Amino acid sequence: MSDLTKEQENIMKEHYDNPKNNKALENYNARGVGRNPDNWGQVDMYLQIDENEILSDLGYEYKGCPTISFTASVFTEELKGVPLQDALKTTQAELDELNAQSNCDDCIKMILVAFIAANENYIERKKGINTEDYTFNMIETTVPYTEQSCG
């Protein structure tokens, strides 16, 4: 954390001590699930998208490594008020970058995959397809479970 300012360190500590948005939204209009097939970790992402396609609220629930809660807290707070398409581009770029690395960031990947799945669900709902269900995606793992060290 030496590259962070004191203010950034305080923000990170706040998310670690008091994670934000760790809840299922009651009035969501998109839901996606990201799962790790190797260890059954899972992130459920809930989005509330307004009529201008701005992310007005986000929530998440998870099962897996403790890193998820802290990271998803930061992720969801940063995306509030952001246009959906901008958030999707950023999320996809981050996932592509993580997939290109050889280290294990599967806990973080589940958050990103869940968001992308929620976007797919939103598109389906706008078309009137799959309106009561959610979209489920698996992360692509390249490291055997026995060698993973997330969290």
Image (cartoon, rainbow, N blue to C red):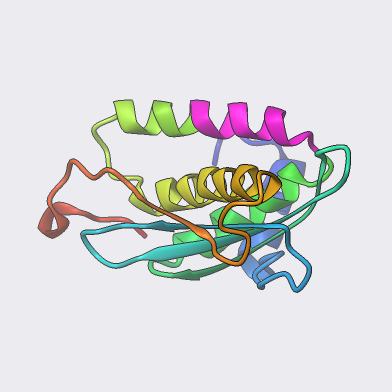
Please say whether residue 126 is visible from this viewpoint: yes
Look at 82% across and 40% down and name the residue there. 54
Using the image as rendered, state which of residue 43 and residue 98 is in the foreground.
Answer: 43
Q: Nearer the viewer, residue 31 or 139?
A: 31
Q: Quadrant of the C terminus?
A: bottom left
Q: Is residue 73 left or right of residue 26?
A: left
Q: Residue at x 65, y 69 (%)?
A: 22
Q: Residue at x 31, y 26 (%)?
A: 100
**Left or right, residue 93 beside residue 89:** left
Residue 12 seen in render = no
Q: Residue at x 55, y 65 (%)?
A: 133
Which residue is the extreme one toward the right?
Answer: 51
Q: Please determine whether, in this image, residue 3 is positioned above or below residue 75.
A: above
Looking at the figure, which quarter contains the N terminus? top right
Residue range in magenta is 82-93
- State the image coordinates of residue 67 (x, y, percent, origin top left): 46, 60
> In the visual, does 57 lie left or right of 71?
right
Chief secondary structure of the magenta span? helix
Residue 119 position in % (x across, y down)? 60, 44
Quadrant position of residue 51: top right
In the image shown, does 107 or 40 lie closer to the viewer?
Answer: 40
Whether residue 84 is in magenta: the answer is yes
Q: Position of residue 13 (x, y in %)?
A: 66, 58
Q: Which residue is at the front of the view, 21 or 25?
A: 25
